Image (tube, rainbow, N blue to C red):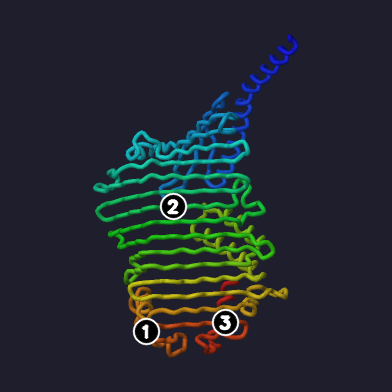
Amino acid sequence: MRKTTGIIGTAAVIIVAAGVAAPWYTGKRIEQEFRQAMTQISAGAPTEVTQYDRGWRTSDAVTRTVIETEDGPWQVEVHHHMTHGPWGFGWARIDSTPDFGEHQNAVAHYFGEQPALEANTTVGFGNDVNIDWHSPAFDETDVPESPGARLAWGGMDGHYRLADNRTDSSVSVPSLNFQSDDATLTLNALKMDSNGAGGPDWPNMDNFWDGRFKTTLGQLNLQDNAEGVALKLGLDGQGQLRDNGDDGLSMNASWQVSNLLMQGPSLAEPLVINNATQTLALKHLPRDATHRLLIDLSNVDDSLDEDQVSGQMQNIMTRYLLEALKGTPTAEITIAGLDTPQGSLEGKLALNFRALDSDRDPLATALERGNLTLDMASDRTLLTRLISMSEPNARPEQMLQGLEQQGLLAREGDRYRMDVEMNSQDLRINGESHPELYMMLPLLLMSLNG
């Protein structure tokens, strides 16, 4: 009996010791992982851990992130309170709240004593990560910087999950309303969802391209009387990225626009679209080149001026185009149901390439291997309106008549049609060959290669 009691007592001591030591050990590992995570974040926005107080059951840390704005660098501090596992919730729970420093009073004007944004992170036993963030709503409030202006915020909720190099995320903004004497901004029912490959190892992972996304926007209304700008629209978009093995990568996307109004100094007349649907399909994209493209784009030095950044982007995209043209990429764009007060328009553009069977430059052989088709039909009144919008001094009726005489547009009652076929030997528009236009295409490709 004494032996049994001794064994039970020893086991109890071990269990108690393990229970006491577990949070301390977990806290030590949490600090290591936390600092590594901040180092990874710093690659996108300079971030450092300015304070870390590790305790037995809980820890507290402060991080500082520098965000570049037009008015100069803006420092944002985030306070993190960590609860060590492994009890119940997993390895760790982290509650994070930003401190906006010199802007904190301005933020408190709208949110009062509530945090403007708070995030709750849980790290599970399988190293899965769940983050929920929330911004509370506030009723219509005056804007001190704009006398007479009012701002109302419907709040924001978001969720992010990482498990086994797969991510799921969602963001929902019910409403935003800004009103002033000369400007209005209203946003209703914005929701964004995505899932696919991700995590710390992205894009250095086998399924880096896999993903789906969806965005819906009930209504956006922007009116700036001082600048003469107006924009209204509703939006529903979705897309999918897939790795098809030996068949390469593919992307399919579609978006539907409703009740669109655009007005601005660059437009002679407002553009109004009742409804429009557009789709994009890309297939046979090169896997290795696309992988390098994503890495190169993430490494663009955004501290340079606009022209230098633009030059970097152009070089990156040109290199990718050359790699893509070594294969057999295809692209298909459709516009269906473009309905406006002046009429409707439908169209489809398809482009594909045969395999490259020599060591010649892929761009130089693009015309030989490429095949392009374009089918487009539009009401005459809509084409007239589009020409007038793009060029205030244009004479659209004479322009359309000239294109018709040249065979570039075919008239069918009150509608115009254009059918284009281009291959390695000819360019045909509405059934007629146009060698003079075909001869101009190599000059365009040479300018791209330069």
User: Disc 3 marks which residue?
Assistant: 422
Relative to 250, 430 lies left or right? left
Instruction: Identify which residue is drawn at 46% across, 63% down.
Output: 255
Seen from this angle, which residue lies furthest right?
3
User: Disc 2 marks which residue?
Assistant: 191
Instruction: Identify which residue is drawn at 33% across, 42% down.
Output: 138
Relative to 437, 183 lies left or right? left
Alpha carbons under labels 3 and 2: distance apart:
41 Å
What residue type is disc 3 on?
Answer: Met
User: Which quadrant holds residue 391?
Assistant: bottom left
Image position of 12 with respect to 72: above or below: above
Q: Which mark is residue 219?
A: none
User: Disc 1 marks which residue?
Assistant: 414
> CB of mark 2 within 8 Å of CB of mark 1?
no
Q: Secondary structure at mark 1?
A: loop
The picture places residue 132, in percent across and down from the top left corner, at 49, 41
The picture places residue 422, in percent across and down from the top left corner, at 57, 82
User: Which quadrant holds residue 313?
Assistant: bottom right
